[in-house]
Amino acid sequence: MNIGEKICFLRKDRGMTQEMLAEQLVISAQAISKWERGVANPDLEMIPKLAKIFNVSTDELLGIAAPRAAESELEKRIASLERLLEMLTAKDEGASKEIMLREAPRISCFDFSKMSAEDKQKWKPDGLHIMDDKGTLCMKAVPVERQVGEIVDPQCIIAGLSVPLDGVSRILIKLSTVGNRHHHALQVFFTTRENANWDEYKSIRTGYPNGNKMTLDLAVNHPLFCGILTGLRIDPFADGQGKTEIESVMLLTQQGEVVFELQADEYKDKIVRKSNDDKLEGITEPTIVLKNAESCPQLPNISFSSDPVKFMRQVWDPMLLHDDLDLNIDRARYIHLRIKTTLFDQNRQPWYDMRANAHINAEMKLYFKTPGCEDYTEQRRFNVQYLATGQMQDIYVDTSNNGFWHGTLTGLRLDPIEDQGASFELEQIELLQGTPKIKMSGFMSSLEEKIRKLEQDMDDLRSEVDDISCVRDDCEDMCDELDSRVEALESRLEELENGE
């Protein structure tokens, strides 16, 4: 940077125009313009005056010493502009929030990549296997057996049949049910020699009220209801508890001809009780099989009561918790999690993938405890839906969405995934102060300052244009003067020629 460029930089940095600088030096604005354009250099006596006006040393003005203060300020401005550009071009709201919160004050930080083994042990894993205790806190979810609830699925099976189904179009069932619901759903399954499985798509379903005796007339219009019927299965209610009495079951043609008829009193001595897993092989004659039900032989009809069945399944519900915290969270606006999650089975889609955003494939729950609440409750919880990309990512949880987040934090529980096998690495948990609105206003103030600076530069450019116009006018005057001299010389030449 030559001295002219240095004068131009310092003048603009101080918000001065060429006229303002020229006035302080008691010279013309055209002289300043010539310095800055490199056409001329200032006289030596002007160097101390310029250094005093710009509040710099003469060495710095001449480029002998680096202007650290100016460079530092310039670096800050460049960094601010880069952050502003990054925020304005961010792909989504989450990315913008991450940019704005990078420099937010930290109220508390749990950095597992730098944490001692003793401090890591304060975080207790549940449903997790620790894979690696170096660096980040790496964990792998393991399945656990959990009783989800109790269901009732009583079944009355008429096995050992051999009934041709040609022309059969209706099933009549006389029954009555006393249960724990006002309305029940009855489902009839069938097996044939060609297809001996109780398949869900091979069923006929109907609804009926609780209580009184009734006859259910089921129209059969199923493409697989053909050939030789080997079994009928009646499920009086799939999720309820009570007692059912079946008086008779009939198969009819469209014209009302009876193809098969079962009267309850004829089969009272042919009732077999089996568990849900028992097979029906070896039954060669019509037999009543009750599953998940207790028969009542003292009644005239096929009467049975349903038994509750415990339903167990494997679920993944890993969690990481710390029950011995003592942190003031009144100013903690955001929770920052730096985490990487990888699902074991990428083809298994959770239920929320069927909603509007089909790209979300994991759900995180973050529970917290405060004084007066000894357990992790649903009221003190944050839900976060995110992508299990297998890459380390930053997740920011807005705590203003929960009115219980205040006072003293006594416990924190992280459930990174719900009902899926996965591994995850946790690098940091931070409590941040500040809001995007405040950060945004800071960015906007910085942007307004840059706009004002740009307007000043435009004014300086207009001043330079005016200087050029003045030079152009001077040149035109000089040209006019030269034209006048040429005309005078031509006139003198003519006089001399005429005098000779």
Image (cartoon, rainbow, N blue to C red):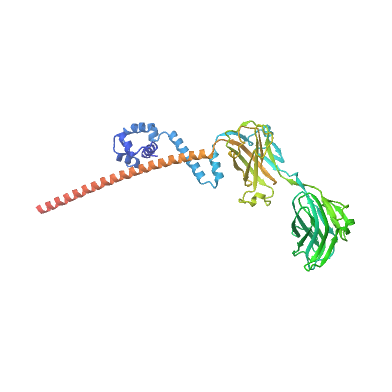
Q: Quadrant of the N terminus?
A: top left
Position in image of residue 2 (x %, y %): 38, 39
Q: Residue furthest left?
A: 499
Position in image of residue 51 (x %, y %): 36, 32
Position in image of residue 307 (x %, y %): 81, 48
361 to the left or right of 487: right
Q: Quadrant of residue 168?
A: bottom right
Q: Residue furthest front?
A: 212
| Placement of 429 over or under 194, stated as above or below | above
143 to the left or right of 264: left
Position in image of residue 388 (x %, y %): 64, 46
Residue at horizontal 55 percent and vertical 47 percent from the top: 92
Looking at the picture, tell me which residue is in the foreground, 482 or 330: 330
The answer to whether residue 153 of the structure is visible from this angle is no
Q: How many marks?
A: 0
Looking at the picture, tell me which residue is in the foreground, 324 or 137: 324
The answer to whether residue 124 of the structure is visible from this angle is yes
Looking at the picture, tell me which residue is in the foreground, 76 or 179: 179
284 to the left or right of 134: right
